[in-house]
Image: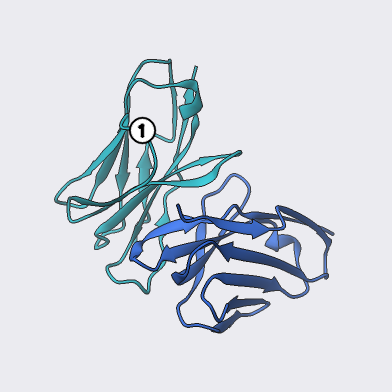
Chain colours: A blue, B cyan
Amino acid sequence: GQQVMQIPQYQHVQEGEDFTTYCNSSTTLSNIQWYKQRPGGHPVFLIQLVKSGEVKKQKRLTFQFGEAKKNSSLHITATQTTDVGTYFCAGGASYNTDKLIFGTGTRLQVFP
Amino acid sequence: KAGVTQTPRYLIKTRGQQVTLSCSPISGHRSVSWYQQTPGQGLQFLFEYFSETQRNKGNFPGRFSGRQFSNSRSEMNVSTLELGDSALYLCASRQTGTNYGYTFGSGTRLTVV
């Protein structure tokens, strides 16, 4: 079945450093969504990318969707302690856009 | 605007029992999905409902079932509970159309002893 992997699994950074998480799907995706889950919380929707090669920015966060629509990345510039949490990508299967398969997640820890 | 409401927040059951979890989506959201979250397996898709119909189903045994009512509220049921069913069960709803993300509830933490 469809699988979505993320790397790295964990990332510890010093506040002010940059952070990137990568998402790779075994199949072509119709769209990719990104979510953030704070410790003890629930996933919160960040953004959706639909077009091949699409790049979107939200303040210090930059999201990219690969040309082949099988991979994506999230880059955070100058991390802050408020960025702590687990970041999940979630892929919409090309044959059925209403079912999301979540990636394995990247847990980010930011040290002040 | 009220968020996605899940009840109960916490539940402790013994093996062999059954459990029903409830989810009230955001008003106007007709699509409701359920996910199981465990430390080892991450977020696993259970099923998705739209207008009282199950549109998608994940790879879970038949002990896991769900339904959606005409007001879009949804329930999921797990029968013959096993220790491995201990997890955070998350419900999420979204607006019709593919350009919207899911809004998750706070989840129900199920512990099977």
Q: Quick check: B113 left or right of A11? A: left
Q: Quick check: A13 left or right of B18? A: right
Q: Is residue A98 visible?
A: yes
Please name the amino acid that badge 1 sits on.
Answer: Pro
Q: Is residue A87 visible?
A: no
| The one of A5 and B11 positioned closer to us in this rendering | A5
Can you give x and y, in whole percent of width and height, for residue A53 in the image? 55, 84
Residue in the image at 69% along x and 73% along y: A75
Residue in the image at 59% along x and 44% along y: A40
Residue in the image at 32% along x and 29% along y: B63
Name the residue tied to disc 1: B61
Residue in the image at 84% along x and 59% along y: A112
Can you give x and y, in whole percent of width and height, for residue A13 in the image? 82, 61
Q: Residue furthest left?
A: B70
Image quadrant where residue A19 sits: bottom right
Q: Is residue B83 above or below residue B55?
A: above
Can you give x and y, in whole percent of width and height, for residue A61 in the image? 65, 75
Q: Residues within 10 Å of mark 1 (few under 14, many from 20)?
A: few
SS type, badge 1: loop
Q: Is residue A105 above or below residue B107?
A: below
| The one of B22 and A88 positioned closer to us in this rendering | A88
| The one of B105 and B58 positioned closer to us in this rendering | B58
Can you give x and y, in whole percent of width and height, for residue B85 in the image? 46, 28
Q: Quick check: A37 left or right of B21? A: right
